[in-house]
Amino acid sequence: MRLVSRPSFMKIHKLLKACFQVKSMENKKVGYLIIGIAIVIIFIIFLFNNTMRDIVDATCSTEHGTSCPMYQSIDQQTYLSFAIAALLVIIGLVLVFSKPQERIIVKKVKEKQKPKKYDLKGLKPEEKKVFNLVKEKKAIFQADLIEQTGFGKAKMTRVIDRLEGHKLVERKRRGMTNVVVLKE
């Protein structure tokens, strides 16, 4: 038995998400908010203090007079409450008057690189074929080159050796195989 249908559940979910989504606030706004809360707390402290004194006056004055120990307890709690409220006001003022954090945005500007021209004169057709595969992929495993060209391992090693001699590619060891990359 379903209590809430699927579409209405999604609407409720979206509504709750929108209500409780915390947006970033500036330090100044948060500082004002904390100071406002502290002022409300101070107002509540005064109300509570007056109410407690009225209660103590009504119950304690007949028995102990003006030296009732409850007055001292009320004073201690009031001072502690004011200290907490003062701490909140100080934190709020620090946030209001503190310098906001600067956002540093660094954009990398990609330089337009001109396509590098490679001198392929004097290369055999199989060397050109391997070079074009490496150029297309930028980096490729030697085993993949063997698979794509159909050359044997020994022939591929000789072709890559000649391309390295012409300073067109570079072979890098990766585990049990080699990666062939364009020479920059």
Image (cartoon, rainbow, N blue to C red):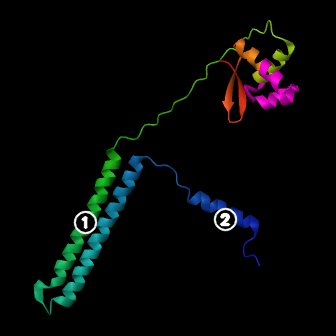
Tell me where residue 72 sits by quadrant. bottom left
Residue that badge 1 annotates? 82
In the rendered image of this protein, does residue 139 appear above or below residue 65? Answer: above
What number is the disc on residue 12? 2
Q: Report the amino acid beneath label 2.
A: Ile
Span colored in magenta: 136-158
Tell whether position 139 is magenta: yes
Horizontal side, residue 10 vs residue 21: left or right? right
Which residue: 11% across, 84% down? 67
Which residue: 56% across, 27% down? 108
Q: Position of residue 31 (x, y in %)?
A: 37, 52
Question: Callout 2: few (<14), some (14-19), or many (20+) C-alpha neighbours within 10 Å?
Answer: few
* Total marks placed: 2
Q: Report the amino acid beneath label 1.
A: Phe
Tell whether position 20 is magenta: no
Q: Residue furthest front?
A: 154
Q: Verify CB contact (< 8 Å) between mark 2 and mark 1.
A: no
Element class at badge 1: helix
Which residue: 81% across, 20% down? 130
Q: Can residue 116 be seen by looking at this rendering? A: no
Q: Quadrant of the N terminus?
A: bottom right
In the rendered image of this protein, does residue 104 appear above or below residue 2? Answer: above
Identify the mark nearer the N-term, 2 or 1. Answer: 2
Q: Quadrant of the C terminus?
A: top right
Q: Can residue 52 be seen by looking at this rendering? A: yes
Q: Position of residue 152 (x, y in %)?
A: 85, 26
Which residue: 21% across, 77% down? 74
Question: Callout 1: few (<14), some (14-19), or many (20+) C-alpha neighbours within 10 Å?
Answer: some
